Amino acid sequence: MAKPATYEGRPQGAPNSLSSAGDDARNINARDGHIAPGEIAIGVVIGRASEYFDFFVYAIASVLVFPSVFFPFADQLQGTLYSFAVFSLAFIARPIGTVIFMAIQRRYSREAKLTLALFLLGLSTAGIAFLPTYARLGTVALLLLALLRIGQGIALGGSWDGLPSLLALNAPEKRRGWYAMLGQLGAPVGFIIAGSLFAFLLSALGDKDFLEWGWRYPFYVAFAINVVALFARLRLVSTPEYARLLDERELQPTGVFEMVGSQGRNLVIGALAALASYALFHLVTVFPLSWITLYSLRSVSDFLVIQIIGAGIALVGVVVSGLIADRFGRRNTLGALAVLIAIFSAFVPSLMNGGESGQNLFVLIGFGLLGLSYGQAAGAVTANFPARFRYTGAALTSDLAWLVGAGFAPLVALGLSAHFGLAYVSLYLLSGAVGSLAALSLNRALEIRD
């Protein structure tokens, strides 16, 4: 049986209640044998699906609920922009959460870090469900909403468990694209569940009941899913075999300042390489929902159904991306999809102004491209990091990619379309595609030079 690993930053045998609890968890789950890539993949899919469900519950509520409930003093457009500004706070807080919880892991254990992070995520999510409205608390309600949103972002940064990196390193050499896409399945799965729940509530309840209490139920469900996901992930993370694999692969947290000083170039390239995917992410999920709500007479629940179908297409696209990447290479796949996204960006105005059929095409094609590109977006260039920096580097690369590519996308896209026209949304998406191509080209040139 593999021996339990010792954790850096704490002398072996030093008394500590949190680390003792982690040791007990490992002993409970101790078993002989080998952790196969498929088993790691299950942990990755469970963890990411729960996180993305939380993500989309908040995102959809930012469009359909928060402008009326928390910003009733503003008109609908301005209230939605305010709501999107609060939405972006989680992406700003996410890298901060990574830094804080990496320190917790170095001081205590992986189990302690993951438990605290998911506890904070569940507390923040449940807190939003019970949050009084602006009509009852005034400005205090807005401050609490912002605080809870920041809590979600810090928790998401802290919930990095290293499973995606471990999966990539343990996957068969010619199937790394296939295994890389498994964690990305969580995005369309999370949207399908969250969108279906909101579509049902919108259809079953009147507007008054939905805005008074119906919107809170998805947040309750998100809290329950977090609890289940916590135990599922801890069951894997707390095994001696998992700790041994991480130690063998040198997947341990390193000092952030040391890593930035040594690997800043790789961080920037990694964050920008998938910029097209991350920009498109919110331009086919959150933005069109807000645009339809503000400028169309379409039924919101019916449009959500179209988006759910689109997420199903994205789900297939994520799977197919693994096959394509294993044949042509992950970076080649990302580059080709960035070109297709650039072409797609030119059709944003005509499709969104093209009535229901045009809007449906925008959503379905957009989700298809999103699945194919996002399926390989995570960690496409993290192999650039030396082994000792890969654990922290992968986490911060993901945080920065979300911040630069997706964090402000709904706010920017809606603001541009409302004040200058949809053509500027095309330029915004095009800039993301150009950024991806530039980063991938720079990465290739540096590889050749180095």
Image (spheres, rainbow, N blue to C red):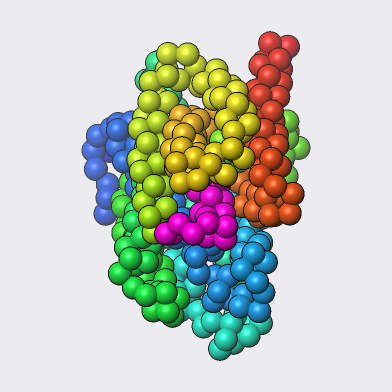
Q: Is residue 294 something that shows in the picture?
A: yes
Q: Which residues are magenta?
A: 281-300
Q: Position of residue 129 (x, y in %)?
A: 44, 74
Q: Quadrant of residue 193?
A: bottom left
Judge by depth and name the residue closer to the eye, 432 or 448: 432
Q: Is 76 included in the stretch rendered in magenta? A: no
Residue at the image position 42 percent from the left and 74 percent from the top: 207
Counting the numbered discs, the total is 0
Q: Is residue 117 left or right of residue 259?
A: left
Q: Is 287 included in the stretch rendered in magenta? A: yes
Q: In what quadrant of the picture does the N terminus appear?
A: top left
Q: Is residue 407 left or right of residue 105?
A: right
Residue at the image position 30 percent from the left and 69 percent from the top: 204
Q: Position of residue 232 (x, y in %)?
A: 31, 52
Q: Position of residue 97 (x, y in %)?
A: 60, 56
Q: Is residue 105 something that shows in the picture?
A: no
Residue at the image position 53 percent from the left and 33 percent from the top: 377
Q: Quadrant of residue 219?
A: bottom left
Q: In what quadrant of the picture does the C terminus appear?
A: top right
Residue found at the far bottom of this picture: 136
